[in-house]
Amino acid sequence: QVQLVESGGGLVQPGGSLRLSCAASGSIFTIYLMGWYRQAPGKQRELVATITSGGSTKYVDSVKCRFTISRDNAKKTVYLQMDSLKPEDTAVYYCYCNVETYYNTAGYWGQGTQVTVSS
């Protein structure tokens, strides 16, 4: 059993910053890919950023140079530093981890955290 707990969402003005965190716990052997997705009202969930166990990162074009994904393997935690936030970044943000447990390897989702960018 693996649990992902997110924190750090909230209300911020345009141009502001937020830092999301997602901590994994449970019977974890290895965490491979970690990432953040978001879903705005009336839209499909989209990939925001990913980071491999080796530290390679990828971003959706709309957040490049504004968002930074990072991870702390010892803490089993992935972060998303969001700067220069825009109203169109408003969404529920979900973390995703591909986890190897002692039983299998599978993907897990966090519960989601609301990010609202508004003046």
Image (cartoon, helix red, strand yellow):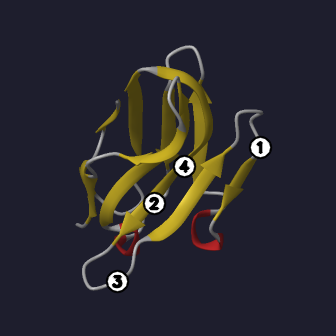
Are dots 3 and 2 in contact, CB under 8 Å? no
Q: CA distance from mark 3 to mark 2?
A: 12 Å
Question: Is residue 114 visible from the viewing direction of this image?
Answer: yes
Which residue does the numbered mark 2 point to in the structure image?
37
Q: CA distance from mark 1 to mark 2?
A: 17 Å
N-terminal of the pair, mark 1 or mark 3, is 3
Tell me the residue at 70%/41% (across/down). Answer: 52
> What is the crowding at mark 3: few (fewer than 14 residues within 10 Å), some, or many (at least 20)?
few
Q: What residue type is disc 1 on?
A: Ser
Which residue does the numbered mark 1 point to in the structure image?
56
Q: CA distance from mark 4 to mark 2?
A: 7 Å
Q: Which quarter of the rendered picture does the C terminus lie within? A: bottom left
Q: Name the residue nearer the viewer: 32 or 46.
A: 32
Which residue does the numbered mark 4 point to in the structure image?
35
N-terminal of the pair, mark 3 or mark 2, is 2
Are dots 4 and 2 in contact, CB under 8 Å? yes
> Left or right: where does residue 85 sit relative to residue 99?
left
